[in-house]
Image (spheres, grey):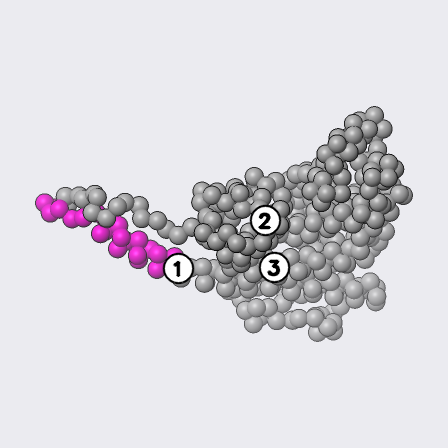
Amino acid sequence: MALEGSIEEFGLADILQLLYFQKKTGLLTVEGRLGRVKIYFHSGNIVAAESKRGMEDKRLGKILLKKGIISEEKLQEAIEERKTSNEKIGAIFIKNGIVSKEEIQEIIINQLTDTVVQLFNWKKGTYEFKQQRIIMDQQLQISVDTQHLLMEGLRIIDELAVIEGKITLDTILRQTMKKDAVLSDEEKTYLSFIDGENDVSTIIEISDEEDIKVYRVILSLLEKGLIEPLEEEELVDKGKQQEIIGGFRIPVISLITNFLLIISFIISLNPFFIQKLNTKKINAEKDLVRIRLSIEIKKATSGSYPASLGVINTVKIDPWNNKYLYRISRTGYELRSSGPDGIPNTPDDIY
């Protein structure tokens, strides 16, 4: 089975559903601007995931160290042993009795889940699935229900809808005067990145963590009142600069101030409309994932795709009060929302 294409045309949720319902075994590679992720399937469930951004063994060691489960000395010993044994670092910890199998399993499953669900936030990229034999780790026996990850992906979409109304990648944050909040070690680390100059995209790069994780921590710090978005500062002291225009001395700062007031008013309106539009788009994308899931369940149970959305129990109207468009094609089916303009086959259609 060869399966490849663009995320824009065939979303991650569709791919995961297809591989799950057909109980496929093999390797799915997803590549985009933020890196490359490899997801290993066995009989439709996910047994491993690797991201280009982070080496899984290295991240496992760092997590165990942060949790206080191992010491720096034990970590270095395991790293040295790994060089000669070629064993995974988790297996070395278990073999030497340093960490329990259950503790390693929990951390790896959390890593795997985070690696996969962050892909639901990718809007562009390519995918390729190759059917091949996958050798499972017999010691750890990791296997995550793909359906569970699909539901987790939907929850992430919901969460992002809330976050996008408060912060964006270009939001610059500064620390407030509040100092009495109780913080986790992770929150303390992120707080140190916030200096009134770094925007959210820079903080993501500094932290070398997935976007959604960074957003969650920043949102937590915002809710605790420890940070705030940077307000527009005065560019020039009042009355400091003046210009001669048409023979008259007119304070430029007055012009700037009035101009900024007008621009600020216009900008202050935009987030409302942008957020409203983005929220509807996100809700439509979320609906489409649920509809596709219902369609695939119908196909798996009856052997054929439903003749129309009316015969399955699912949402049928998009956020703009138009019917979701569905039709069976030679290669499967087509599903979309006609978008804000309500006109099919236009650039704002949502797939």
For mark 2, give the secondary structure: helix
Q: The magenta stretch spans which residues?
A: 246-268
User: Can you identify the residue that label 2 sits on?
Assistant: 187
Tag shown at residue 159: 3
Q: Position of residue 171 (x, y in %)?
A: 47, 49
Give the residue displayed 82% in from the left and 52% down from the top: 44
Which mark is first along the chain, 2 or 3? 3
For mark 3, give the secondary structure: helix
User: Can you identify the residue that label 1 sits on?
Assistant: 268
Q: Position of residue 183 (x, y in %)?
A: 59, 51
Does residue 116 lie above or below 291 as drawn?
above
Does residue 348 lie above or below 173 as drawn?
below
Q: How many marks?
A: 3
How crowded is the residue under tag 3: few (<14 C-alpha within 10 Å), some, or many (20+)? some
Front of the two marks 1 and 2: 2
Q: Nearer the viewer, residue 151 or 203?
A: 203
